[in-house]
Amino acid sequence: MPAWALLLLFFLSVFAVFGLALAAAAQRSRKEPDEPPVLGPPQEASPLLKREVLSTISVWAYLLSRFAFVGKLTTLLSEADLNWSVGRLTALMLLAGGASLALLQKIAFIPGWSALLAGGAAAFLPYVYVSHRRERRLSRIEGQLPDAMDFLARSLRAGHPFAVALDLLGRENIPPLAAEIRQTAEERKLGLSWEAAFENLCRRIPLQEMSVFAAAAQLQNRTGGKLSEVLAKIAENMREVSALRGEVRSISAHGRLTGAILTLMPVAIVIVMSTVNPSYLGILVAHPRGKDLIAAAICCLLLAHVVIRRLVMIRV
């Protein structure tokens, strides 16, 4: 299939989805009852509030607003600390998938079905990058939490109020945890309650350790007590859990190494055989069904590697 035909098919699909979304919106508006008129001048949203823009392209933003997965993508980008919009991420996914499919279609040796699979896999590369960045950021925050709890405990023992200790933590700690703590302290200064501020913090950092810290701080704010001892105990438990996770990773390292060896072994065998006896694999390459068998073997090899990685991934 030529490249211009793929581009034409892509634009036709986009316009078809857009037309279906407009038809669904019109049908929904006909079913909904008319709202009563509002007396008085129309109220406009405050220009001080931050508006979440899905995309700078109005048509694309309208299409994205009709899907439920947009909220999950927005949360994912926020947790990854990327200044991207959902429209940019989805556009990158479509561009990566379309460009990969167009390039693979130009190679005669690659079967059509494998080119479609490879194009679909390439479309998820931007999403995988964002997910990997999110996991790495949360892992860094998780490693900084025990020291942060000890810092708060020492500040409270020195006589500082909890709000001052939290502000000092946000100023003296290193990112990315410092930025999140500083934002929580600023929200409290602007009049937000501790419950709402910690709820926003747990939403931005979806870690169990952060939820435990927020629950302990809110409980102390309601009932009182020695928060410094509670925070010291939380830091000790966090270090024990981190040590346990390190032990589990060291035990499962054998499984990860086995998966890597099993994945690379067929590739090494093919390289050695093509060097020693090129005619042995030439029959498979020259056969009409040979490229289908080679593409299927590569797909099964990658799928097996993913399955092995999932099996040895143990969460504590």
Image (cartoon, rainbow, N blue to C red):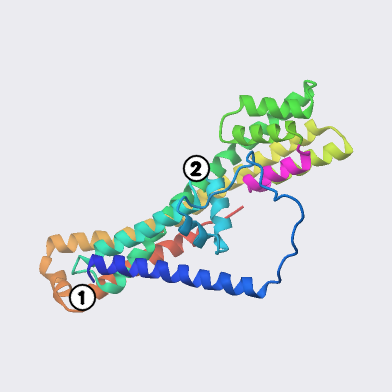
Q: Position of residue 59 (x, y in %)?
A: 46, 59
User: In the displayed structure, would residue 54 be above or below residue 159?
Assistant: below
Q: Position of residue 98 (x, y in %)?
A: 33, 62
Extreme residue in the front direction = 40
Q: Which residues are magenta?
A: 192-209
The amino acid beneath tag 2 is: Asn
Residue assigned mark 1: 290
Q: Quadrant of residue 216?
A: top right
Q: Is residue 301 visible?
A: no
User: In the displayed structure, would residue 230 be above or below residue 158?
Assistant: below
The prevailing secondary structure element of the residues shown in magenta is: helix
Magenta stretch: residue 193 in it? yes
Mark 1, residues whose alpha carbon is within 10 Å: few (<14), some, or many (≥20)?
some
Q: Could you tell me how far apart the alpha carbons at marks 1 and 2 are, in whole angstroms?
A: 46 Å
- Placement of the N terminus among the 4 image quadrants: bottom left
Q: Residue at x 56, y 50 (%)?
A: 248
